[in-house]
Amino acid sequence: MIGTAINRTWQQLLHPKFRSVFLTSVASALITLIGLTFVLSYYWPETFVFGWDWIDELGESIAAAGFWAVVSVGSYLLFPGIVTMVMGVLIDKIATAVEEEYYPNRIGTREVPITDVVISAGKLTLIMLVVNLLALVPYIILFFMTASAGAFALFIAINGFLLGREYYEMVAMRHMDRKMMNRFRMEYGSKIFMVGAMMAAMFAVPFLNILAPIIGAAVMTHVFHHLIAQRRAA
């Protein structure tokens, strides 16, 4: 299911109907990452103080790393949440482009106020920022204790859950009311998490992180329609 969704998404990326949405989305994600890096560079502290000597020494090393530390923190901890808020207004266009190509008889017609989209994306952004910042010390500890594997697994678990839930809601709200949407999410939570985990993994890879929100929105649209068809056939 997810393999088919990814394959169809790659095939459609430069399709004429999808091209303008794709390029606009990539430009938005790229501008967001550049702006975030610039802001972090400007306000980057000279040192970090956590209250534990050995972590404070590590914090001094992170602060001294300068630009590359900024890029790492910006790309991995802050970018997924912030770009999702920016992409909130574009996800409807991405989902519509996918549905027009593959599901012309099931195009989402439910009116979703732009304020609902912005509020939903804003809430996710805030949650992702807070959770990832709270997990910063565990990330650092796991990075050194497990040769980065543990930190990567924690990153995937946290952000996969949050991204999967938010992108699912952005796609599903075009078809369902809130009550039905929540019930559907509870029923197919593992599938939704798998899409979120795929997105989180993409956000962890340089250059692919620019494509992650576009591909994630398209893949989630395919998965959503597959689950709807599966449920109707049951």
Image (cartoon, rainbow, N blue to C red):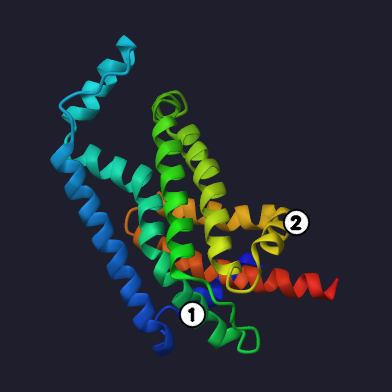
Name the spot of residue 117 as percent of width and height, x first: 47, 64
Viewer-nearest of discs 1 and 2: 2
56 to the left or right of 219 = left
> Which comes before the other along the chain, label 1 or label 2?
1
Q: Amino acid at mark 2?
A: Glu
Name the spot of residue 9 as percent of width and height, x first: 51, 74
> Which numbered circle lies on residue 187?
2
- Secondary structure category for the residue under label 1: helix
Q: Amino acid at mark 1?
A: Gln
Q: Quadrant of residue 2?
A: bottom right
> Which numbered circle lies on residue 201?
none
Name the spot of residue 72 as percent of width and height, x first: 29, 42
- Secondary structure category for the residue under label 2: helix
Could one spot residue 145 in this view of the protein?
yes
Seen from this angle, which residue lies furthest right? 234
At a point 24% along the width and 23% down the height, the residue shown is: 48
Q: CA distance from mark 1 to mark 2?
A: 29 Å
Q: Quadrant of residue 228?
A: bottom right
Q: Is residue 34 above or below residue 154?
A: below
Q: Is residue 80 above or below residue 131?
A: below
Quadrant of the rendering where the C terminus is positioned: bottom right
Q: Is residue 213 above or below residue 144?
A: below
User: What residue is pinned by disc 1?
Assistant: 11
